[in-house]
Amino acid sequence: MRPIVYIPRDSGALALGAEKVVRALEKELESRGLDACIVRTGSRGLYWLEPMVEVETDDGRVAYGPVAPSDVAALFDAGFLKGGAHPLSLGKPEEIPYLKRQTRLTFARCGIIDPVSLADYEAHGGLRGLRNALAMTPLEIVEEVTESGLRGRGGAGFPTGIKWKTVHDTPADQKYIVCNADEGDSGTFADRMIMEGDPFVLIEGMTIAGIATGANRGYIYLRSEYPHAHQILNEAISIARQSGVLGPSVLGSQHAFDMEVRVGAGAYVCGEETALLDSLEGKRGMVRAKPPLPAHEGLFGKPTVINNVISLASTPIILDKGGPFYRDFGMGRSRGTIPIQIAGNVKHGGLFETAFGLTLGEIVDDIGGGTATGRPVRAVQVGGPLGAYFPRALFDTPFDYEAFTAKDGLIGHAGIVVFDDTVDMLKQAHFAMEFCAVESCGKCTPCRVGSTRGMEVLSRLRNNIEPERQLEIVTDLCNSMKFGSLCALGGFAPYPVISALTHFPEDFRPTPVREAAE
């Protein structure tokens, strides 16, 4: 049998040298007169082990990593094409503790299949959900998604079924499905991993949403910083169209659905759904006042479903296995699985898909392995640049929407950024205000003016100018922004500031060290 070698084409793996490893593999095969098939996959999400090379053996796949081009000759000498022993051998990938502990539903195929092979996708369970959906009425599909308990994975946690039902019930001659792939939060990469590693699951999910709501057109709004995802998505969409998965007759049915990718221009605020719609329409991305809701008057004034990549990519397994199957994972009102992205100063950074309910401490200390520097963890920011900073005292908080809200935090897109004890929390608070000031669309005063004033106040605090007065002002500013801003950009910017003030007050008081340095 011709040996098969798998190596990712995922952006994270490419950044760590995967392309150079491929060239070294090809050169070594040629020089040794050997023949093997190299399949480019997505990443499994174990980024501290990338580039991770896998080889098919009679006993299943065997993984090696992290592999550098200089390691390739030694791998061949060790007989790695047959799973031979080598210091870089990781054994069977599914037995690696980081992977073995996961519950992979949405990411079940990531790192396993060729992302642009529809045959590979179907061989691993793809299109079963869509085929089931085609045998159901639109309302039955909506009810199945509602029963699953799926909530928006983009940050707000709004029930997906309710959004779909609203669009389903709104009469119109044209409806749209819009996928928000403007993944701009720090420490997040789940959307990119799906789009680069399993694009057909997103195509399938959007098609199911179209059939459920009566929409026949879809758009993926992709951030410009994802050129590899752009290429792979376009290739997959073309293959789906040629194969009859997309087009005037979806898999030979009476339902029509087609889609295309639109690339944004780097504005963080376009991750907000109404600003995204303005951008899609060719306008400057500005937040719209609500109502009307996009579900009633969205893209070009028509009823529109706007869901995050992971929300849409989770629907095929719901339609395949059923709503109750998906609902059985999780806790409270947080049902199903969540792809947690562990980043920052952490030993084992990567994607970890699991049912809701693990504590923050388990994620950071047990799964993430603590800091990469070996120093104590001081703070963890959950939910992107506008997420709250949690101290170790809150590490018993379960990963659950309501549990985080109760602690004045938010899950957001489930990105976790770890900081050790050298972090300056006053500097982090200033960064939050600066980020908001730079990215604000400028439409509402609390966000536009409040963030700029916040930067000034925190700068005066750092310079020890009337510190008590500055603390009063920044607290008041945060309240005004939180309750007066038009969208979540201004409304959530106070979360990192207030949490830093609350949990790390010592960093906001003048110290001899700071005064001497300045």
Image (cartoon, rainbow, N blue to C red):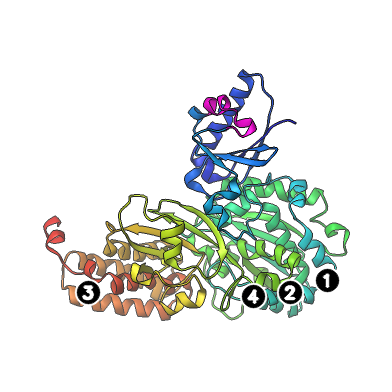
**Badge 2 is on which residue?**
144
Q: Quadrant of residue 150?
A: bottom right
Q: Residue at x 62, y 67 (%)?
A: 307
Of circles 3 and 1, the one toward us is 1
On the question of residue 27 being in view, the answer is: yes
Q: Residue at x 24, y 79 (%)?
A: 472
Query: Is residue 53 rendered magenta in the image?
Result: no
| Numbered label attached to residue 149 | 4
Q: CA distance from mark 2 to mark 3?
A: 52 Å
Secondary element under disc 3, as helix, strand or loop, is helix
Q: Are marks 3 and 1 in contact (CB under 8 Å)?
A: no
| Numbered label attached to residue 136 | 1
Q: Amino acid at mark 1?
A: Met
Q: Earlier in the sequence, mark 3 or mark 4?
A: 4
Q: Earlier in the sequence, mark 1 or mark 2?
A: 1
Q: Quadrant of residue 260?
A: bottom right
The residues colored magenta run 72-84
Q: CA distance from mark 1 to mark 2?
A: 10 Å
Percent position of residue 287, x then y: 52, 71
